[in-house]
Protein backbone atom coordinates (compact mmCIF):
# COMPACT_ATOMS: atom_id res chain seq x y z
CA UNK A 1 0.00 0.00 0.00
CA UNK A 2 2.77 2.39 0.90
CA UNK A 3 4.59 1.53 -2.30
CA UNK A 4 1.50 2.40 -4.35
CA UNK A 5 1.14 5.74 -2.59
CA UNK A 6 4.81 6.48 -3.19
CA UNK A 7 4.43 5.66 -6.89
CA UNK A 8 1.35 7.92 -7.14
CA UNK A 9 3.25 10.77 -5.53
CA UNK A 10 6.14 10.31 -7.92
CA UNK A 11 3.73 10.30 -10.85
CA UNK A 12 2.01 13.54 -9.83
CA UNK A 13 5.33 15.25 -9.12
CA UNK A 14 6.65 14.29 -12.55
CA UNK A 15 3.34 15.40 -14.13
CA UNK A 16 3.52 18.77 -12.36
CA UNK A 17 7.12 19.30 -13.45
CA UNK A 18 6.29 18.41 -17.07
CA UNK A 19 3.26 20.73 -16.98
CA UNK A 20 5.37 23.56 -15.62
CA UNK A 21 8.05 22.99 -18.24
CA UNK A 22 5.43 22.91 -20.99
CA UNK A 23 3.84 26.13 -19.63
CA UNK A 24 7.18 27.95 -19.53
CA UNK A 25 8.12 26.80 -23.04
CA UNK A 26 4.70 27.71 -24.42
CA UNK A 27 4.64 31.13 -22.73
CA UNK A 28 8.17 31.86 -23.94
CA UNK A 29 7.31 31.23 -27.57
CA UNK A 30 6.44 34.17 -29.81
CA UNK A 31 2.94 34.55 -31.15
CA UNK A 32 0.97 37.17 -33.03
CA UNK A 33 -2.36 38.49 -31.86
CA UNK A 34 -4.65 41.48 -32.47
CA UNK A 35 -5.52 43.97 -29.75
CA UNK A 36 -6.51 47.60 -29.21
CA UNK A 37 -5.26 50.41 -27.00
CA UNK A 38 -7.64 53.03 -25.65
CA UNK A 39 -6.75 56.58 -26.73
CA UNK A 40 -7.33 59.99 -25.10
CA UNK A 41 -5.99 63.45 -25.89
CA UNK A 42 -4.45 66.17 -23.70
CA UNK A 43 -2.86 69.55 -24.35
CA UNK A 44 -5.89 71.21 -25.96
CA UNK A 45 -7.32 74.46 -24.63
CA UNK A 46 -10.71 73.07 -23.66
CA UNK A 47 -11.88 76.58 -22.80
CA UNK A 48 -11.70 77.51 -26.47
CA UNK A 49 -12.32 74.18 -28.17
CA UNK A 50 -14.71 71.29 -27.67
CA UNK A 51 -13.90 67.84 -29.02
CA UNK A 52 -16.54 66.72 -31.50
CA UNK A 53 -15.01 63.44 -32.64
CA UNK A 54 -11.89 61.36 -32.70
CA UNK A 55 -10.30 57.95 -32.52
CA UNK A 56 -11.01 56.28 -29.19
CA UNK A 57 -8.95 53.15 -29.91
CA UNK A 58 -5.82 52.27 -31.84
CA UNK A 59 -5.83 48.74 -33.30
CA UNK A 60 -2.50 46.91 -33.15
CA UNK A 61 -0.90 43.72 -34.38
CA UNK A 62 1.46 42.50 -31.67
CA UNK A 63 4.07 39.76 -31.89
CA UNK A 64 5.01 38.91 -28.33
CA UNK A 65 5.80 36.09 -25.94
CA UNK A 66 3.10 34.97 -23.55
CA UNK A 67 4.70 36.47 -20.46
CA UNK A 68 4.78 39.96 -22.03
CA UNK A 69 1.18 39.58 -23.19
CA UNK A 70 0.12 38.55 -19.68
CA UNK A 71 2.02 41.49 -18.13
CA UNK A 72 0.31 43.91 -20.51
CA UNK A 73 -3.07 42.41 -19.71
CA UNK A 74 -2.54 42.85 -15.96
CA UNK A 75 -0.94 46.32 -15.93
CA UNK A 76 -1.80 48.28 -19.10
CA UNK A 77 -4.96 46.83 -20.62
CA UNK A 78 -7.36 49.36 -19.10
CA UNK A 79 -5.05 52.36 -19.17
CA UNK A 80 -5.58 55.12 -21.73
CA UNK A 81 -2.71 56.20 -23.95
CA UNK A 82 -2.61 60.01 -23.82
CA UNK A 83 -1.92 61.75 -27.10
CA UNK A 84 -0.44 65.21 -26.44
CA UNK A 85 -1.82 67.76 -28.92
CA UNK A 86 -0.18 70.87 -27.44
CA UNK A 87 2.36 71.10 -30.26
CA UNK A 88 -0.30 70.81 -32.99
CA UNK A 89 -2.37 73.57 -34.52
CA UNK A 90 -6.04 73.14 -35.31
CA UNK A 91 -6.97 73.44 -38.94
CA UNK A 92 -9.14 76.52 -39.44
CA UNK A 93 -11.14 74.74 -42.13
CA UNK A 94 -12.33 71.60 -40.40
CA UNK A 95 -10.86 71.70 -36.86
CA UNK A 96 -8.98 68.49 -37.54
CA UNK A 97 -5.73 67.19 -36.04
CA UNK A 98 -4.01 64.09 -37.36
CA UNK A 99 -1.15 62.57 -35.39
CA UNK A 100 1.08 59.86 -36.85
CA UNK A 101 0.62 56.59 -34.97
CA UNK A 102 4.34 55.87 -35.22
CA UNK A 103 4.92 58.78 -32.82
CA UNK A 104 3.77 56.53 -29.97
CA UNK A 105 5.35 53.28 -31.10
CA UNK A 106 8.17 53.46 -28.54
CA UNK A 107 5.71 54.03 -25.68
CA UNK A 108 3.56 51.11 -26.83
CA UNK A 109 6.63 48.94 -27.28
CA UNK A 110 7.47 49.46 -23.61
CA UNK A 111 3.90 48.73 -22.58
CA UNK A 112 3.86 45.36 -24.26
CA UNK A 113 7.40 44.38 -23.39
CA UNK A 114 9.72 46.39 -21.12
CA UNK A 115 12.56 44.08 -22.23
CA UNK A 116 11.94 44.86 -25.90
CA UNK A 117 10.89 41.37 -27.04
CA UNK A 118 7.66 42.54 -28.70
CA UNK A 119 7.15 43.73 -32.24
CA UNK A 120 4.26 46.13 -32.83
CA UNK A 121 2.57 47.04 -36.08
CA UNK A 122 0.07 49.89 -36.23
CA UNK A 123 -3.17 49.09 -38.02
CA UNK A 124 -3.80 52.81 -38.62
CA UNK A 125 -1.31 55.31 -39.98
CA UNK A 126 -2.67 58.19 -37.91
CA UNK A 127 -4.96 59.14 -35.06
CA UNK A 128 -7.52 61.78 -35.98
CA UNK A 129 -9.30 64.19 -33.64
CA UNK A 130 -11.80 66.89 -34.59
CA UNK A 131 -12.67 70.03 -32.62
CA UNK A 132 -15.01 72.97 -32.95
CA UNK A 133 -14.20 76.44 -31.63
CA UNK A 134 -16.48 77.91 -28.99
CA UNK A 135 -17.81 81.47 -29.30
CA UNK A 136 -15.88 83.96 -27.20
CA UNK A 137 -16.68 87.19 -25.39
CA UNK A 138 -14.32 89.55 -23.56
CA UNK A 139 -15.19 90.94 -20.14
CA UNK A 140 -13.44 93.67 -18.16
CA UNK A 141 -13.26 92.39 -14.54
CA UNK A 142 -14.90 94.71 -12.03
CA UNK A 143 -13.64 95.20 -8.48
CA UNK A 144 -16.41 94.64 -5.95
CA UNK A 145 -16.33 94.89 -2.17
CA UNK A 146 -12.56 95.33 -1.94
CA UNK A 147 -11.34 97.07 1.19
CA UNK A 148 -7.75 98.20 1.77
CA UNK A 149 -5.87 98.82 4.97
CA UNK A 150 -2.52 100.61 4.88
CA UNK A 151 0.45 100.95 7.20
CA UNK A 152 0.50 104.12 9.31
CA UNK A 153 1.60 107.08 7.23
CA UNK A 154 1.03 105.30 3.89
CA UNK A 155 -1.83 105.28 1.44
CA UNK A 156 -3.00 104.58 -2.07
CA UNK A 157 -1.13 106.38 -4.84
CA UNK A 158 -3.10 106.41 -8.07
CA UNK A 159 -5.60 103.74 -9.02
CA UNK A 160 -5.26 99.99 -8.47
CA UNK A 161 -4.94 98.07 -11.72
CA UNK A 162 -5.97 94.57 -12.81
CA UNK A 163 -4.01 92.21 -15.02
CA UNK A 164 -5.18 91.06 -17.46
CA UNK A 165 -7.60 93.86 -18.18
CA UNK A 166 -9.83 91.43 -20.10
CA UNK A 167 -10.98 87.89 -19.30
CA UNK A 168 -12.58 85.71 -21.98
CA UNK A 169 -15.56 83.41 -21.68
CA UNK A 170 -16.13 80.73 -24.32
CA UNK A 171 -19.45 79.07 -25.02
CA UNK A 172 -22.72 79.35 -26.92
CA UNK A 173 -24.18 82.70 -27.97
CA UNK A 174 -27.17 82.15 -25.69
CA UNK A 175 -25.08 81.50 -22.58
CA UNK A 176 -22.64 84.35 -23.22
CA UNK A 177 -25.51 86.78 -23.77
CA UNK A 178 -26.92 85.83 -20.35
CA UNK A 179 -23.66 86.71 -18.55
CA UNK A 180 -23.50 90.49 -18.26
CA UNK A 181 -20.27 90.97 -16.30
CA UNK A 182 -17.43 89.36 -14.37
CA UNK A 183 -16.72 90.56 -10.86
CA UNK A 184 -14.07 89.82 -8.27
CA UNK A 185 -14.97 88.12 -5.04
CA UNK A 186 -15.01 90.34 -1.92
CA UNK A 187 -11.61 90.70 -0.24
CA UNK A 188 -9.91 92.55 2.59
CA UNK A 189 -6.33 93.43 1.66
CA UNK A 190 -3.65 94.61 4.08
CA UNK A 191 -1.22 96.58 1.92
CA UNK A 192 2.42 96.91 2.98
CA UNK A 193 4.58 100.02 2.74
CA UNK A 194 5.86 99.01 -0.67
CA UNK A 195 2.46 98.23 -2.14
CA UNK A 196 2.16 94.86 -3.81
CA UNK A 197 0.30 92.47 -6.05
CA UNK A 198 -2.60 90.35 -4.88
CA UNK A 199 -4.47 87.50 -6.53
CA UNK A 200 -8.24 87.93 -6.64
CA UNK A 201 -10.67 85.17 -7.54
CA UNK A 202 -13.52 85.91 -9.92
CA UNK A 203 -17.10 85.11 -8.99
CA UNK A 204 -17.61 81.86 -11.00
CA UNK A 205 -20.83 82.82 -12.78
CA UNK A 206 -19.78 80.55 -15.66
CA UNK A 207 -20.51 77.51 -13.47
CA UNK A 208 -24.21 78.18 -14.03
CA UNK A 209 -23.76 77.38 -17.73
CA UNK A 210 -22.43 73.86 -18.53
CA UNK A 211 -21.21 74.89 -21.99
CA UNK A 212 -19.19 77.92 -20.82
CA UNK A 213 -15.46 77.92 -20.08
CA UNK A 214 -13.26 80.73 -18.76
CA UNK A 215 -9.80 81.74 -19.92
CA UNK A 216 -8.73 82.23 -16.28
CA UNK A 217 -10.54 82.30 -12.96
CA UNK A 218 -8.16 84.73 -11.21
CA UNK A 219 -6.78 88.20 -11.85
CA UNK A 220 -3.79 90.04 -10.42
CA UNK A 221 -4.43 93.30 -8.58
CA UNK A 222 -1.57 95.82 -8.32
CA UNK A 223 -1.87 98.39 -5.52
CA UNK A 224 0.49 101.40 -5.76
CA UNK A 225 1.45 102.92 -2.40
CA UNK A 226 3.49 105.90 -1.23
CA UNK A 227 4.04 107.81 2.04
CA UNK A 228 1.37 110.32 3.05
CA UNK A 229 2.04 113.65 4.79
CA UNK A 230 -0.31 115.81 6.84
CA UNK A 231 -1.44 119.06 5.25
CA UNK A 232 -4.01 121.45 6.70
CA UNK A 233 -6.34 123.83 4.88
CA UNK A 234 -8.73 126.48 6.20
CA UNK A 235 -12.05 126.34 4.37
CA UNK A 236 -14.98 128.74 4.39
CA UNK A 237 -18.17 126.95 5.45
CA UNK A 238 -20.95 127.10 2.87
CA UNK A 239 -24.60 126.66 3.78
CA UNK A 240 -26.76 124.76 1.30
CA UNK A 241 -30.51 124.26 1.21
CA UNK A 242 -31.33 127.64 2.77
CA UNK A 243 -33.28 129.28 -0.04
CA UNK A 244 -36.24 129.92 2.29
CA UNK A 245 -34.14 132.33 4.36
CA UNK A 246 -32.47 135.52 3.32
CA UNK A 247 -29.52 135.39 5.69
CA UNK A 248 -27.88 132.76 7.89
CA UNK A 249 -24.99 133.40 10.23
CA UNK A 250 -22.62 130.54 11.03
CA UNK A 251 -20.41 130.39 14.14
CA UNK A 252 -17.62 129.78 13.30
CA UNK A 253 -17.79 130.27 9.55
CA UNK A 254 -14.46 128.53 8.89
CA UNK A 255 -13.05 125.10 9.70
CA UNK A 256 -9.54 123.66 9.57
CA UNK A 257 -9.33 120.43 7.59
CA UNK A 258 -6.28 118.21 7.96
CA UNK A 259 -5.65 115.90 5.03
CA UNK A 260 -3.34 113.00 4.45
CA UNK A 261 -1.63 113.99 1.18
CA UNK A 262 0.59 111.78 -1.04
CA UNK A 263 4.22 112.79 -0.57
CA UNK A 264 4.67 113.30 -4.32
CA UNK A 265 1.84 115.86 -4.37
CA UNK A 266 2.54 117.65 -1.12
CA UNK A 267 2.27 121.43 -1.56
CA UNK A 268 0.37 121.17 -4.84
CA UNK A 269 -3.02 122.84 -5.22
CA UNK A 270 -4.87 119.57 -4.99
CA UNK A 271 -7.39 120.72 -2.36
CA UNK A 272 -8.37 124.05 -3.95
CA UNK A 273 -11.78 122.74 -5.02
CA UNK A 274 -12.67 121.28 -1.63
CA UNK A 275 -15.78 122.56 0.10
CA UNK A 276 -16.91 122.61 3.71
CA UNK A 277 -20.68 122.25 3.57
CA UNK A 278 -23.55 122.36 6.08
CA UNK A 279 -27.15 121.69 5.14
CA UNK A 280 -29.91 123.52 6.93
CA UNK A 281 -32.45 121.03 5.56
CA UNK A 282 -30.84 118.34 7.72
CA UNK A 283 -30.85 120.40 10.90
CA UNK A 284 -34.20 119.15 12.18
CA UNK A 285 -34.37 122.06 14.63
CA UNK A 286 -30.88 121.38 16.04
CA UNK A 287 -28.72 124.36 16.89
CA UNK A 288 -25.49 122.77 15.54
CA UNK A 289 -24.94 121.61 11.96
CA UNK A 290 -22.38 118.89 11.07
CA UNK A 291 -19.74 119.93 8.56
CA UNK A 292 -19.20 117.76 5.48
CA UNK A 293 -16.10 118.03 3.28
CA UNK A 294 -16.84 117.55 -0.42
CA UNK A 295 -15.15 117.74 -3.81
CA UNK A 296 -11.69 116.67 -2.66
CA UNK A 297 -9.50 114.44 -4.90
CA UNK A 298 -9.82 110.70 -4.40
CA UNK A 299 -6.13 110.34 -3.48
CA UNK A 300 -6.59 112.52 -0.39
CA UNK A 301 -7.78 111.21 2.93
CA UNK A 302 -9.34 113.34 5.64
CA UNK A 303 -7.67 113.02 9.02
CA UNK A 304 -9.72 115.59 10.98
CA UNK A 305 -12.12 118.53 10.72
CA UNK A 306 -11.96 121.17 13.43
CA UNK A 307 -14.59 121.93 14.51
CA UNK A 308 -16.77 119.06 13.28
CA UNK A 309 -19.96 121.14 13.59
CA UNK A 310 -20.96 124.81 13.62
CA UNK A 311 -23.84 126.79 15.12
CA UNK A 312 -26.24 128.82 13.02
CA UNK A 313 -28.48 131.81 13.45
CA UNK A 314 -31.27 132.68 10.99
CA UNK A 315 -31.58 136.40 10.34
CA UNK A 316 -35.03 137.31 9.06
Image (cartoon, grey):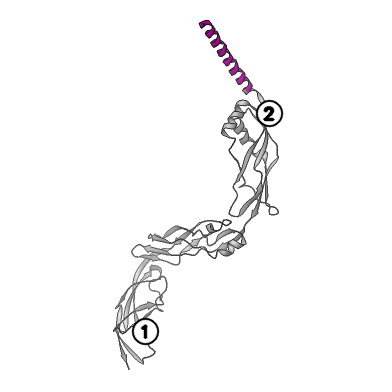
Range of the magenta residues? 1-26
Q: Nearer the viewer, residue 257 or 105?
A: 105
Q: Does the magenta run of residues contain 2?
A: yes
Secondary structure at badge 1 equals: helix
Within the image, what quadrant is residue 132 found in?
Answer: bottom right
Label 2–label 1 contact, CB within 8 A: no
Q: CA distance from mark 2 to mark 1?
A: 98 Å
Q: Does the magenta run of residues contain 65?
A: no
Residue 135 left/right relative to 229: right
Residue 251: x percent and y percent? 29, 85
Q: Magenta-highlighted stretch: main secondary structure? A: helix
- Neighbor class of circle 1 (other Cα within 10 Å; few <14, some 14-19, many 20+) is few
Q: Which mark is first along the chain, 1 or 2?
A: 2
| Relative vertical location of residue 257 with respect to residue 101 in this rendering, above or below | below
Residue 139, label in figure? none
- Residue at numbered disc 1: 281
Within the image, what quadrant is residue 173 found in?
Answer: bottom right
- Residue at numbered disc 2: 32
Amino acid sequence: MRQKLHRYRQFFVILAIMTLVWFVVDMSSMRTYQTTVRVGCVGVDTARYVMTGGDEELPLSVESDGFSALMHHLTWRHRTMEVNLSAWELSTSDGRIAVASETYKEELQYRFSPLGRSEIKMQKDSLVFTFSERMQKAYRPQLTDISFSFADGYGLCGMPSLKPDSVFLYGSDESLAAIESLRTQPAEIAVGKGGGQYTLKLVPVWNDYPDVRVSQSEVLLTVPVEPYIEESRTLKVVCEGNSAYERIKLYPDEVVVTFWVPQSRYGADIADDCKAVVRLDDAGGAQELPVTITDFPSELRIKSVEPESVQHVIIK
